Amino acid sequence: MLEKLDNSYCINRKEFPGYFTACLLENEIIEVEFDKDFKEVDKETVLKLQAAFQELGEGKKMRIYFSTNAFMNITNSGREYASSNNAQHFTRANAILIDHLGKKLLFNFFLSVTTLRAPTKGFSTREEAIAWLLTIS
């Protein structure tokens, strides 16, 4: 059964309770929504994300949209692993929801200390993020 998310359908879902739900949209974008009480991305979280991307994308590089919580943090081990070739193996591009100042400050800090191999941008709305991801081939 397809689940409608705004203007797109979720055709497959992978859940990691306490962490996030990843949904493969019909436009071949994976949407990640972190659980509402989730606060800190560590290496274990990045490994779970990578497993979800591999499974949902059937081993292909995918475009990823992240809907984040208000004050999520990333640990040093999470940041280091997120910037590795292994962690980026199934990622074509990242779009992150940055819908208030606190998120923007954390996102800008993350980008200043992390080298990501896939194009990564922050957006103030889901619609802008999805539109940008669709331009990435």
Image (cartoon, rainbow, N blue to C red):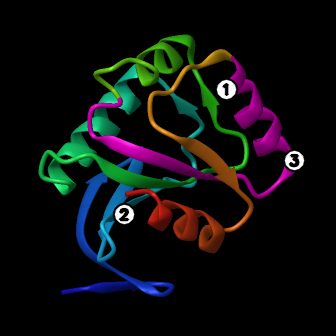
> x%, y% of residue 45?
39, 32
- Distance of mark 3 from mark 2, alpha carbons? 26 Å
Please tell me whether residue 73 belongs to the stretch shown in magenta. Answer: no
Residue depicted at 59% across the width and 19% down the height? 114
Q: If you read the primary sequence from the N terminus, does the residue marked by circle 1 or circle 2 appear first?
A: 2
Residue position for label 3: 101
Residue depicted at 32% across the width and 84% down the height? 3
Query: Label 1 sits on what residue type?
Result: Phe
| Residue located farthest toward the left when viewing the structure as drawn | 58
Please tell me whether residue 99 belongs to the stretch shown in magenta. Answer: yes
Query: Label 3 sits on what residue type?
Result: Leu
Q: If you read the primary sequence from the N terminus, does the residue marked by circle 3 or circle 1 appear first?
A: 3
Residues rendered magenta in the picture = 88-112
> x%, y% of residue 75?
56, 18
- Distance of mark 1 from mark 2, alpha carbons? 23 Å
Q: Which quarter of the image is occupied by the C terminus? A: bottom left
